Amino acid sequence: PSFITSEDPSTFVEKTASQSPQGVNNVNGVNGINGVCVANPGSVGHPELCRRPCLHFTAGYCGHGSSCNFCHETHPQKAAKLDKRQREIMQNLHSKEAAALIFEYVKARVLQADIEGGQTLVDLLEVERKDADTTCIHPRDLRHLRKTMSRLNLYSLLGIFASKSS
C-alpha cells in the first residue's frame, strides 16, 4: 500500500505550511513556506511546490486576484509535462516502480529547496521504492522519461506518484 492517499499533491504543501509555524508567514490569509510571503494560494511554495502559472496573470490581469489557485510568480521556462507515451508508461507501472523513477528527482528538489518536512517524504519514497524493477521499461523510453522528470518541479513529481496511489 502506498503512503500518499490524496490525488492532489497540494495536500503536502498545505500540510507542510500548517505544521511549520516558525517557517511560515501568513499574509492576507495566504501561507508562505520558509519565511517567504506570497500573494495568492497558488504561489505557495514557488517554484517547487506551486501549481502551474496563472495564464490570466501572465496576460496582465487575473480576476481571482489574491484568491487565485494558480501561481502568480515568474516561471522562467515553460513547465515540463509528460508526453502521451510517457503517461502511458507511468500508468502501466506499479507504485513501487513509479517511486523508484521519481525518487532521485524528489530528493534533489527537497534538498535544493530546503523544504521543511521534505526529508520525511524522501524517507517514505525510499521505503516505497524498495525492490522496484524498472527493467520492464525500454531503455530509450526510460532515458526520455528521466530527461522529462529532471525538468519537472516537485509538485508535478508528487502528482505522478499520487496518481499511482489512488
Image (tube, rainbow, N blue to C red):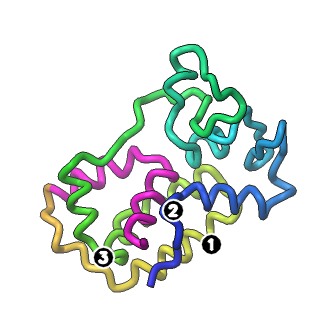
Residue 159 is inside the magenta segment: yes
Q: Residue at x 34, y 85 (%)?
A: 131
Which region is colored magenta? 141-166
Disc 2 to disc 3, how far (Cα)? 20 Å
Q: Is label 3 in contact with label 1 (beta carbons under 8 Å)?
A: no
Local secondary structure at mark 1:
helix
Disc 2 to disc 1, how far (Cα)? 10 Å
Residue 107 is marked as: 2
Residue 94 is marked as: 3
Decide which of tag 2 and tag 3 comes sooner along the chain.
3
How many other residues sit within 10 Å of disc 2, few (<14), some (14-19) or many (≥20)?
Answer: some
The residue to which callout 1 is attached is: 120
Q: Residue furthest front?
A: 63
Find residue 88 and report its horizontal and vertical position in percent: 21, 59
Find residue 104 and report its horizontal and vertical position in percent: 43, 63
Decide which of tag 3 and tag 1 comes sooner along the chain.
3
Q: Nearer the viewer, mark 2 or mark 3?
A: 3
Q: Residue at x 69, y 35 (%)?
A: 67
Q: Residue furthest top?
A: 60
- Would you identify the image quadrant in which residue 19 lies? bottom right
Amino acid at the residue labelled 2: Lys
Q: Is 134 placed above or below 51 here?
A: below
Amino acid at the residue labelled 1: Thr
Disc 3 to disc 1, how far (Cα)? 21 Å
Q: Is label 2 in contact with label 1 (beta carbons under 8 Å)?
A: no
Of 131 and 6, which appears nearest the observer?
6
Local secondary structure at mark 3:
loop
Q: Is 166 placed above or below 27 here?
A: below
